[in-house]
Structure formats: C-alpha cells, structure tokens
Amino acid sequence: MPLANPPAPIRTRSAVTASGLWRAYGSGEAQVLALRDVSVEFASGEFTAIMGPSGSGKSTLMHCLAGLDTTDRGTVSIGDTSLTGLGDKALTRLRRDKIGFIFQQFNLLPTLTALENITLPASIAGSKADPAWVSRIIDTLDLADRLDHKPTELSGGQQQRVACARALATRPEVVFADEPTGNLDTRSGTEVLKFLRTSVDDFGQTIVMVTHDPNAAAHADRVVFLADGRIVDELTDPTADAVIDKMRGFEKLALDMNADNASGQFTGLNHSGAA
Amino acid sequence: MLRASLKGMASRKARLALTSLAIILGSAFIAAALVLTSSIQATANDLNADRYAGVEVLVQPVEPETQGDRMVREGVPADTLAAVGAVDGVADTTTTVTWMINALGSNGKVVGGLAPTNAVNWEDESIDRELREGREPTADNEVAVSAKFVSDAGLGLGDDVTAYSLTSDKTAYEIVGVYGYPGERDTLDGGTELAFTTAEAQHLVFDGQDEYTTVAVHAEDGVSDTQLLAAVEGVIGEESQAITWKEYNEEANAETAETAAYISYFLLGFALVAVFVSVFLIANTFTIVIAGRLKEIAMMRAIGAGRGQITGSVLLEALILGAFAAVIGAALGVGGGWALTSAASTYLLDTASVSLSIPITAVVAALAVGIGVTVLSALIPAVRASRVPPVEAMREAVKADKPITAMSITGGILAFIGAGLMVLGLTETIDKSVEVTAVGAGLVFVGMTLLTAWLSRPLVAVLGLLWSWNFAGKLGRRNASRNPRRTAVTAAALMIGVTLVTATGTLMSSVKASIEDYFEGSIEAELIVSGPITAAIAPSFDPALMEDIREVEDVDAAVELYYDPADINGTEQFVYATSDIPSGVGLYGGTVEQGSLDDMSDDEIAMNASAAKEVGVGIGDTVTATFTRGEEPHEFTVAAIVADNENSDGWYVTTAYTDEFYTTRPTSALVDVADGADVEAVSTSVDDLLADEPEVTVQNQEEFTAQVTVIYDFVLIAIQLLLGLAMIVAVIGVINTLILSVLERTRELGMLRAIGMTRGQTVRMVTVESVTIALFGALLGIGVGVLIGWALQRALADTGVDVFALPTLLIAGYLVAAVVVGLLAAIAPAIRASKVNILGAIAYE
C-alpha cells in the first residue's frame, strides 16, 4: 500500500462508549423497553457488527449511539465528546463532523451527481473535503468513471458504494452502517462489505454495522449480540457459521421472553421512535 | 368508491383545504359581482322610484340633436306650462328648474370634484326636501342648501355663499335653510344641491328666461296616465315632449342598469382571472395527490379496479371538493356582495336602506364555475391516474418524470404563431391590425404558459446563481428544477397575475409617458392656467385678467383660449378662440402651412391640415359654423391652414363670438416666460392675480401633465389591488407544491439531517426553493407582460401612444412581491421540513 496511509489510530482508544443505556417507548401498559442497561465500547479502528433478532433493540442502540435518538438514562460518548445533554444544534454538528452514515436505502440526493453526493457532508459544513483523501476513497471503490452520474443512472451496488464514499469522505470518528447490504444482491453486497473491511484495515476506520445477515457479520472483527434490549453475548473474529449458531440460541431465548413480554416490540421500535 | 373517496379526502384535509380556498375565492368573486350588481340596481331602482313619485306625466324639453358635450338645455317655455295646466284631467302641475352651477366653499374654492353641484328651485317636488334647520328661500338672494353642501363647503346657516353659473356672474346668497332627503340622506347622488326661488333658479339655469327643466303633471282622479299623456301631448309645442312617469322611471332604471353592468364586468373580469389561476392550482393539487397515491392506485388496479373506476374516484373527489368549496364560495360571495352593496350605498348613494337582491344566476354561476372548474381541472390528472400500471404497486423505484416535450412543442408553436400575428398586426400588412396584434399577444401568453416547464430549467439555473454562495441554497435551487412540470404549473399561476398587471402597467406608463412627451416636446409655454379636467363644469376665468398677466415682469406672451365643440359644415369640430391667434398656435408649437394667421378678421377662420381635409375646404373657401349657444350659423372664410400637430389641432377664430361658446369665458391660458427668467417667480405673480378665480390655477408643464395623467394612476392602482387576489391564489399554489415536495422527500430530508444538516439549513433550502419558484413565475410574467404591453403600445402608436415606457418601479415592486410570496409560502413547508423526524424518515419497513 502507498505511504499516504493515515497514521493508524491506537487500537485501544475507544471511538464510541456507551454505559448504562436505557430507552423506553410509550408508557403504562403499552410501554416497551427497547434498551435495558446496555453498556458497550467500540474501539477505534475496529469493525463491529451488532446482531440480534427483530425487535432486539439493535437499531435503537445504533440510533442512540449516533445521536439520532435520545436515551432515558446512561451516557454515550463519541471520541471524547459526551452526547449527554447536547442540543439539536450540537448533535447535528457532531453528526456532521464525527459520524458517517450508510443506510439500507442508500439515501443519495437525486439532484446531485455521485461526486457531489460524496462531498455532501463537507458541503453542508461549508468546508472542502480533502481532495487527495476523497480521490483515494473513490479509487478504492472503483467509482472514478461514475462521478458525473446522477444516482438514478447508477446500479444499486454503485449507489451503495457512493454512499460508503460519502460516509468516509470527512474521515469521521465512526461510521454507522444500518443494514448496508439489505437492499443489494449478494455480489454487490460482498463488494460493499469488502470495502468496509478495507477501510478498517487500511485506513483505520471505526465501523459499527447493524445487520441480521450472518455472512455480513462474518466480515467484522467482533459481533455484539442483542436480545430483548440487552447485550447477551459477543464473538471475536467471527465466522458465518459461528454467528448462525449463536443466533439460533438467541432466537429461542427471544421466543421464550416474548411469552412473558408484551408483544409488538417491533412496531414499538419503528413507529414511536419519534418520542 | 364514495366511501373510499371520502376517507381518502379526510386524510388529506390540509391540502384540500388550501386548494378549496382557491375555488372558494373564485366562486365568491363571481357571486359577489352578480349580487353587487343586482343589489345596487335594486337599491338604485328604489331611489329612482322616489323621483317624481305620484306624478303621472312629465313634460321635458326635446334634447337638441347635438353631439359631444354640448349641454346647454332649452327649457319648457312658460306658455307650455300654462297650456298643460289648462288641459282637462290635469289636477295640478309642479315645476323643476335645475342644472349644474359653481358654488364657492369657505376656502374660496369651487365645491365638489367629480360629483356636481346643482341649482334647483325650492318649489321642485321631484323629491321631498326635509328642512333640518332654518326655512325655505323666499327672496331671490336667499338659498337653502343640502346637508352635504354644508359639510363639503364648510358653510352653515346664516353664512353667505357665492354661486354662479355659465350665464350668471358671481352672486352672494344668504343660507336660510339646510335640508336633507328622505331616509336621513345628506345627498342624492353624491353631489351637493342649492335650492333657490324659482326666479333665481331660472336666472342661473336659463339666463333669466321663464323656462323649466321639467313640468310634472298630476292627473285628476279617474284619469289614467296614458289618457293624460295623450291630452298633454296635444297642447305642447315641438320644443317639448311628454312621457309617462312609468316610462321615465324605466329610463332611469335602464341608466342605472348600465352603470351597474360596468361594475359587474369589472368584477367578473377579475373573477375570471382568479378562476383561471385556480385551474392551475387545482390541476396541480390533484396531480400531486395522485402522485402520492401511486402505490395505492396501483394496488387497487392490481386487485381488480378498472380504469374507469380509478378515473371516477378521482373525479368524484374533485366533485365533492368542488361542491363543498363552491357552496362556501357562493355563500361568502353573497355575503360579500351584500357588504359591498351596503358600502357602495352608503358612500356612493348615501342611503342606508339597501335592497338586497340575490339573483338565482349568482348562486348558480358560482356553483357551476366552482364545481365545473374543479372537475375539469382534475380531468387530466384523473385520466393519468387510470393509466398507472398495476406493477407500480410492487416497485420502489423513483418514478421518472413524464416528458414535457409535447407540451413544450405545442407551447412553442402557439407562441410562434402569436408572435407572427403580432408582427403582422404591428407592421399593418393586414387589416384590423389592433385586433390581430391583440390575438397574437393572447396566443403568446398561452404559448408561454405551456412553455413554462421547458423554460424552467435554464431560467431556474440562472436564478440559482443568486444563491450559489450557499450550499443549502444550491440544494434548494436544484430541488426547484427537479420537477419542471410541477415547478412550471406552480410558477404559471403566479405568472398569469404578474403578466396581466405588467401588461397593463406597461401600457399605462407608456400612455403617461406619451402624454408627458407630447406636452414637453411641443408646448412652448412654460406656464399653463387651467382647472381640473374632472370638474363637472368646465373651469374658466375672467378674460380681463389677461392684461394683468401680460404686465407681469418677464412674461413674453400670454394667450387666453376659449373653447367650443362647434358644428362646422355639419361636423363636430373643436374651435378655439383667442385674441392673439398667431401666439396661441405658436405657443402650442404649431406652424403655418398655407396663408397667414396675422390680423385675422372676425369672419376669418384657420384650422389644421387634416381638419381642412376632413371638412373638404382650402384657403379662401367658406365654412358655416354654429356655436353651442348660438342661434344662427356664421360664415367664415378660411385664412390659414396650420400643419398637423396634436397640440395645436383644431379651428381658430377671433373672440368675436365667444358669447355663443358653451363656455363663454376662456378655459385656459398659455404663458410664455422670457428665456432665462425665473419661472417660479412668474408663476407666483400669476398665481396672485388668479386669487379671485376659484376654478383655475397656474401650473408649470410638469404639474399640468401630472394633473392630466392622474387618472391613469387611479386605473393602475385599482387593477393592482384586484389582481392581488390572483397573487393570493398563487401563494396557495406555491405552498401546496412545497408541502408536497417536502412530503415526497421525507427520506431525503431525514438523511440530510442525519448526516449533519442543521434545521436552519433545512429551512433555508426549502425557502430558496420557494423563492426561486416565485421569482421564476414573476420573471416570466414580467417578460411576457412587458412584451404584451409593448405590442399593445405599438398597436396604439397611431392613436398617440407613441412612447414606450417601462414601469420600472412597478416591475421592481413585483419582484419584491414575488420574493415576499416565496418567503410567505415557504414558512409552513420549511418548518415542516426542519421538523422531519430523522428516525421516521430513514427507517424502512
């Protein structure tokens, strides 16, 4: 690899820290506890997958970590910034400067070209993205000949690669990827996962990925398992098979728990997220 | 289907409410216009019925068969009155002597402006005059005045009032009584009235002759009005005519109907504009609603709904919306019409007793237009909805916009044909050039409306340069050009109003500029003595003053001008009389073509070239002229022909016959100030000399043209105000479009917020989109409006509108207004966009 590698961040430093997170939606009988006392750390330069069955709270956890949702109790820090008590303005700025996002639906702006989409966060900040860095990401993602295209002229895989480039363009402290391969065919999905892997290995990027796909999770350094709002297990250097084995166990557990827990957690998570 | 439509509508309340506002406005305006017209007429008819109530037959002078403003009336002679009184079946007669006069207020100026001051004889029984103070006039130097005169003139009981007519000198009268009219009214028609003894009224109106304006005849019991009419007609001479009261009342009502019809056309015209703008808005809303329901419609199709059912359901929705809005609109319109009638009755007719008349046509028209326009506007979106393939239900894909090619090509062709017609009309290669130009301008307008979508890309891109310094602005601008069709329809609604006001504005400013140019370019005199053209009686002054004016230091020449619409060889011609014909023509910038103006004798006449051609005379020929007050025609020999020049056009005679002129005193004077002298100082001196002349003032050219052109400013303001309505509809359109855009882009907004766009930036983005659309519409409207205004000006160039002037201030005003429209329209959508729930927006099923 060329010398232009950024100095690898010290692995032991933690990029994202959460401790004692509680999050409930609704009230009274209909109350759903999406997170129950979750404490977790994501080391800098590490690729972590968060897994769990539907309704386990993995999306809520990610939203709380990324400053998109508020917590009832507990603290979250990105780098050395604590999210607790930050207002909308500060949170927005934090997301802009320190966090990258990759969504399942790509969520590119149809009015902008691929390149403009990639530099969008910098443009919003009113700054200029480091051209050398951006062109390096573009080369890695093999997007050089697609830069002038509008999203509608790109395939799903290409769109998601543009979204990846956008997430990394500002060299964020951490990239949150929410089911990044959910809308892609296997080949495109693998390409995206390989890139995420590369960005961790070569660029020292910290990535937190929510997924339900064991094959996707197998690309991570570490897998954190959530069930019923709690971290129930974790796995380092996972393989797809190992992940599947663990999952089976939790699904049984989740079924048991659902029996004495009010059903409809899934709905609760997605629809009252506004609270 | 009905249930589905109703439920669907219930879920889109806000947007439908906004849309129905446009329909409501249109319907309300139509209903209001018709109710107002009808009610004003009913109210006026009631008032008309009070006039000569209880009288069977009226005897009036035969109106002389003349043209123009020849207004000197013959009266019904005293012997006719006596003869009528002696007719069998006549119970008694009453007389009316009335005409316009001038009366001076406490400030020494003539009372009144547009509405006249009338003299009347106290014995007149055409209307009840109710004494409020004092008593009736019994001596010739006494007068009773209407309550309105007291307030307008600032005079009261016991004061002296100076009054005079065209035929009588200024005389002071003592106010011995103040009166009102039935229904506590202070005035009959907005004007003021002075009641004299019959002899004094005849002195003012008929120059002292024993004549009457009207003789009212009461029948004895058992004599019908037609019997009486026949009997009366037998004894009156040729100079008088008799009509029944019924006929008289019908004529009066027909006259008010005509006035009311003008008001109604005016209001209906604006109602049409509002309706036209609503068409765009409604069509847009339904397109938008359907776009948002694509999946739902596709699903319905997938589970077996036929195309007809889809179209039907959309049209049903339109029908319900249209009916709902039209009913509210009609109700509001009827209420508004009633309120307007009350206001008009109070201020124009000065009566509190309003007869509300709600013609069934008002309600029917309002409902028909409201419902019809809504359903028709929804037709295209409805048919388009039925074409949604069922497979859309399964697709997530962003739907590509429908091509705008067909629309653009049609628009291009129409605009091209229109432009062609305008060229044809303007170069006068064919007949009826003004009409052809107007049709061409109309086609260009429609063509440009269709071309809006095509124009939106480049124009919006250029506009975008305004905001490109700011990233949120850049995004907003791109959003504005994202859906050219939608942007175009939204902007078109604004464009229509702006086009109309700009076109009128351009034409008006051109007319004004032409008038100003005409006076500045050709009148040599620095100062002009004249009175307001709106005065009921042509303002005039004492010719003896001219000597004094000529004595003023630095005055090179001063020429008085008498004016009469005379009859020359059987045609109506403008005749000027002056004691100094060469200077009069010269100061107007005229030059002699043939003959000489010097030392013209009293039986010589001069005229401009085209007038000579019109009458068919040359130097040395004889013409016969009869002046307005003249009994006998006079013969004149043509002494000179003056080159055509609009200021100096007309016929010139000496002052020998001014006693026979309609206005027997000079109506204006031109004062030529020595070069380099202080015009202001001369003006002040002349002004001092005019202290006792209440009707005229001295003005420099600028003031004079301002006085002449003031009427155009009024027209312009009235049009601007009413077209503000079209603007309101346009604002609703922009709000509608933006709210839809925000809804459609929820996910996008969520993403932008997630990756760090602040609320402020989001607000800015939506606002820029809004302002861009509004500015785009305004710019198009200004462009097309100026073009149309220019074409009209060119077409009217022959009639004297030969200067093209851009109403720059107005145009700047419209641009500012467009920005304001954009900002206002952006408020709700922008707040909505900034409050997008990030989690909800980026979550997926």
Image (cartoon, coloured by chain):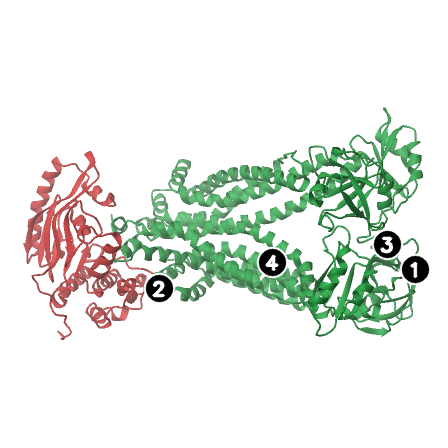
Dot 3: element: loop
**Which of the chains is green?**
B
Confirm whether circles 1 and 4 share one chain. Answer: yes
Confirm whether circles 4 and 2 share one chain. Answer: yes
**Location of residue B356 in the rendering, given as x and y in whole percent from the top left corner:** 63, 34
Name the amino acid, label 4: Thr
Residue reaching furthest front?
Answer: B158
Residue B470, label in figure: 2
Dot 4: element: helix
Q: Which residue is mark 3?
A: B628
Which one is in front in this view, the residue at disc 4 or the one at disc 2?
Answer: 2
Cα distance between the residues tagged 1 and 4: 46 Å
Mark 4 and mark 1 in contact (Cβ < 8 Å)? Answer: no
Subunit that carries the residue with mark 2: B
**B236 to A90, vertically: above or below:** above
Name the amino acid, label 2: Asn
Subunit that carries the residue with mark 4: B
Of A75 and B762, which appears nearest the observer? A75
Q: Quadrant of the C terminus of chain A?
A: top left
Q: Which residue is mark 4?
A: B504
